Amino acid sequence: MSSRVSRGLLLLIIGLAIGLRLWQIDRLPPGFHFDEAFEGLEAWRILTDPTYRPIFLQGNFGVLPLNAYANALTFGLVSWVGGSAGPTAMRLTAAGFGVLGVLALYGLARELRHIAPKRAGLSAAFPLFAAGVLALMRWHIHFSRMGIEPILVPLVWASTLWLFLRGQRTQSWFSFAGSGVCLAAGMYAYQGAWIIPFLMIPTVLWLLVQQWRGQTPVTMAAGDVQPKAGNRRTLLVGAAITAVVALAVVTPLGWFVAQNVDLVLLRPAQLSIVGPTESPADNSLGGAIWATAKMFGPLGTPGDFDPRRNVPGLPALSLGLALPFYLGLLMALFKCANPAYAVPLIGLVGLLLPGVFSEYAPHFHRILGAAAPTALLCALGLDQLWQWRPRQTTLLRWTAIGLLLLGGVTESYNYFVKWASLPDLFYAFDVGLWQVGQAIAAQPSTTPIYLTPRTAEHPTLAFAWRIQTNAHSAPVTFDGRQIFPFTAPSNTAAELYAVIDHEDFRTRLLLPELFPDSTVINEIKDRQGAVYAQFYERPPNTPSQRSPQHSRQVTLGDGIALAGYDVQPAELKAGAMLYLQLYWDVAKAPTADWTVFTHLRQRDAQGNVTLIAGRDDRPGAGSLPTRQWQAGWQILDEYQLALPGDLAAGEYELAIGLYQPSGQPSGERLPATEEGIIIGKVIIE
């Protein structure tokens, strides 16, 4: 194969890689899920806050920062050309890493050719097959279109080895140093890449064994750099240069790890199968190994079942790629004495280990690094067909090309048609939540907005109103299943309630009761037509139409007063649940974070009090603490008291109060008594 043809085919492969990673990138994947949004917010802060330069992202159980810095750069470039920061920009970053991974794998495959045995070695088509397989692999395409960090791992592994082997062949100390930089970059990229330095040890040992045996490289193809006289000294010095450079670059992270071991290991410790987990799956080591071993197909449905990571249950490879993969795997096992065949095996086993030792194997997200050695093994199988020397040589070459094309077409169909049409993607990628956030951000800044039941700190929501220019600020958030705030007695301007009906079943029933004139002005549905969220507008000058069953006017203090309460059900029996709803009036914004106690008590003839049932909690189960209350509000705050099954029939008293549980003296109570205030009595039938 001439160098001109080789370059032309490489350009074709890179073009395919770019096209498959950018096609409909603004729509697929849909939405903006939690992990992407978290890193997007971190990237935005890095871009806009000159004082924020983290070595480790401390939210979301701890995330390494390289992808966030890359996204900050993309945000700046996109904004400079008139675009906007958001999921599309982040996915462009991932697509760029994916394409670079294809190029790095091509370079690594070329270097493997140089250390393959001269007889029955690897052909000039081998690097093209490797790059082509990775470019067309659905597994790699998918994560090249998501704004999270695993896509860095195949790039880091291939780049590190490519530069190291090139340094050995050409005695270029700059290549060894570049390998060290790539090795260190993996430590800043993703926890799944932390195993790569350990994989370098057997790789170097294999190369030393090869040189000790005196094996010589294959004849160079046209355009290749001719190797210089290499020896064990060159290899050892090069390994030392790689290690020293990597250690120097990774020193800041190492210092941080030494100071914050628990934080850095929080995510790996939570996902490990070594300790107890809450996963219903088979989390034994043997089960994880077997699940990982059969993930390449083609029989059965052994793949990842999470729609965020895969077409549920589909193998990592389609039939057109699985067949050459197994052929290449057999070849590599048979010829593993040579580093050219050992390197893909070492990479495959090592980069699969993060998934083997964690929950939900095979977890395509955590083991994405293995996509690169998988592509090399596929290329070994295709190259074997390409070089076969029977009478049907031309037929076998067309078979190799046909398998690659069949694999590419199948992979594209499985991703862009089969996976893209899954109804589950709506929830897997927080599509509804992203649409809610965008709808809130688009509202006039003067419109009061209330959101239930998600908090304003959720990254998918927060990204919508923190990044956009002139966006509405964060709304008031509460859990409508526990609490409900509104302006009382009447509102001077229209108010908007964004209700995620998919999660909050109660607010959509309560709103028409409070405000019969409220209307639905926006509705968000999932891919199956079910209502996900609705936006209710409370017109101006519409007082609440609901009043307490039992009026009880008591001023407790700190701007908080009780207006009354409801008790449900009307007839209470032992073993039932008592629903107590308190009506709070807010005269001024409270200055403290108060906890509410609600007690059902029995008082004997001597005045002695026995606690029968009770609950102590912040308002709305913590979703709307008193520090967030606003002057002029009325708040419906519900507490559920479980009545004992052996409770005797009779009359019992209800008592409430507020206190601060943070070790404050007993005087920090509203009212300033231990017993609180008795608001009424209930009868147990």
Image (spheres, rainbow, N blue to C red):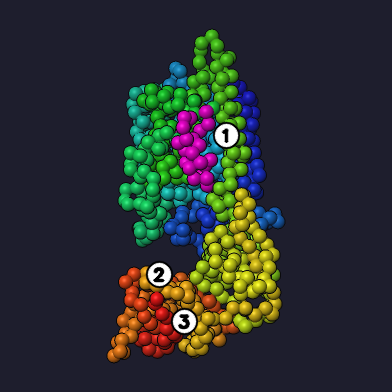
First in sequence, mark 1 or 2: give its number. 1
Q: Residues within 10 Å of mark 3 (few under 14, many from 20)?
A: some
Q: Is residue 111 left or right of residue 76?
A: left
> Is residue 10 covered in magenta?
no
Image quadrant occupied by the N terminus: top right
- Vertical position of residue 521 compared to residue 403: above or below: below
The image's mark for residue 592 is 3
The part of the chain drawn in magenta is 296-319
Residue type (three-letter) at the residue carrying disc 3: Ala
Secondary structure of the residue carrying numbered label 2 = loop
Give the prevailing secondary structure in the magenta stretch. loop
The residue lying toward the viewer, choosing from 190 and 77, is: 190
Which mark's residue is nearer the viewer, 2 or 3?
Answer: 2
Gap between marks 1 and 3, in whole Å?
A: 58 Å
Q: Residues within 10 Å of mark 2 (few under 14, many from 20)?
A: some
Residue type (three-letter) at the residue carrying disc 2: Ala
Q: Mark 1 and 3 residues: CB-CB less than 8 Å, in contact?
A: no
Q: Position of residue 7 (x, y in %)?
A: 62, 29
